[in-house]
Image (cartoon, grey):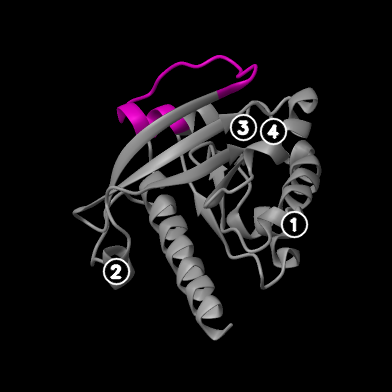
């Protein structure tokens, strides 16, 4: 899991740096969504409280060694009563970050249900999903193959590009690599949509 990024991907040069990407951060309560958001914003750990509604931040992140990309993140609370609102926040989104607690095996089935529900919404067909396996630094965390199986990520289908990223949001380990993969998936999807429009 390190934070080092090696060579720059050629895809990174095809999106103007001034354009802001709309990204929604979802997941069950206490998975670490807000910790992820503020680690990206301040590059340090911020002690957070459960989100009762949503947080929104525009954050400029350096990817590919030197490419600065602006992400407009919407961090939406994960309590059961707030989950019906997820649909409205995912409209016109460029990507979804779905955070799971790698230690909480008991709630992985619930996380799977919510993830599959949100990716099946018609407006979200084909929207790239970055699954953040948070708390990987803890001794009793589930392995990536276990999380992939428990979330049934292979059942998302070929239309939904996804990447499972091991992270520790408290120290930021793995977050930049995950955003890099999400960014690449977004660019590939945009390129594909452009090609489809040209064929019409």
**Contact between labelled residues 4 and 2, with CB atoms less than 8 Å apart:** no
Residue that numbered label 1 is attached to: 122
Residue 159 pos. (x, y %): 66, 70
**Contact between labelled residues 3 and 4, with CB atoms less than 8 Å apart:** yes
Left or right, 103 with reference to 195: right
Residue that numbered label 2 is attached to: 9
Q: Which mark is residue 31?
A: 3
What secondary structure is the stretch in magenta mostly built from? loop
Residue density around tag 1, few if under 14, some if 14–19, many if 20 or more, within 10 Å: few
Left or right, 195 with reference to 89: left
Residue density around tag 4, few if under 14, some if 14–19, many if 20 or more, within 10 Å: many
Residue for point 55% across, 31% down: 75
Query: Between marks 3 and 2, how big is the CA–CA gap?
Result: 30 Å
Q: Is residue 51 magenta?
A: yes
Tag 2 or tag 3, which sits nearer the N-term?
Answer: 2
**Contact between labelled residues 2 and 3, with CB atoms less than 8 Å apart:** no
Q: Nearer the viewer, mark 2 or mark 4?
A: 2
Instruction: Describe the element under mark 2 as helix, strand or loop.
Output: loop
Query: Between marks 2 and 1, how big is the CA–CA gap?
Result: 30 Å
**Contact between labelled residues 1 and 2, with CB atoms less than 8 Å apart:** no
Instruction: Describe the element under mark 4 as helix, strand or loop.
Output: loop
Near-viewer residue (9 or 196)? 196
Residue that numbered label 4 is attached to: 28
Q: Up-down: is 40 above or below 164?
A: above
Q: Nearer the viewer, mark 2 or mark 1?
A: 1
Tag 4 or tag 2, which sits nearer the N-term?
Answer: 2
Quarter of the C terminus within the rendering: bottom right
Residue 83 pos. (x, y %): 75, 32
Q: Up-down: is 196 above or below 28?
A: below
Residue density around tag 2, few if under 14, some if 14–19, many if 20 or more, within 10 Å: few
What are the residue bounds of the magenta stretch? 37-54
Q: Up-down: is 11 above or below 16?
A: below
């Amino acid at each position: 899991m390190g934070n080092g990024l090696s060579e720059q991907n050629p895809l990174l040069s095809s999106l103007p740096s001034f354009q802001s990407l709309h990204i929604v951060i979802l997941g069950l309560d206490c998975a670490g969504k807000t910790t992820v958001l503020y680690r990206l914003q301040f590059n340090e750990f911020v002690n957070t409280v459960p989100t009762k509604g949503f947080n929104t931040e525009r954050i400029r992140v350096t990817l590919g060694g030197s490419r600065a990309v602006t992400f407009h993140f919407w961090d939406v609370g994960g309590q059961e009563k707030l989950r019906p609102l997820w649909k409205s926040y995912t409209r016109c989104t460029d990507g979804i970050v779905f955070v799971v607690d790698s230690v909480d095996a008991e709630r992985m089935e619930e996380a799977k249900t919510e993830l599959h529900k949100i990716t099946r919404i018609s407006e979200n067909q084909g929207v790239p999903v970055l699954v953040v396996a948070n708390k990987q630094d803890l001794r009793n965390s589930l392995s990536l193959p276990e999380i992939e199986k428990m979330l049934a990520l292979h059942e998302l289908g070929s239309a939904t590009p996804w990447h499972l990223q091991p992270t520790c949001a408290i120290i930021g380990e793995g977050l930049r690599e995950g955003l890099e993969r999400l960014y690449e998936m977004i660019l590939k999807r945009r390129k594909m949509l452009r090609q489809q429009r040209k064929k019409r």
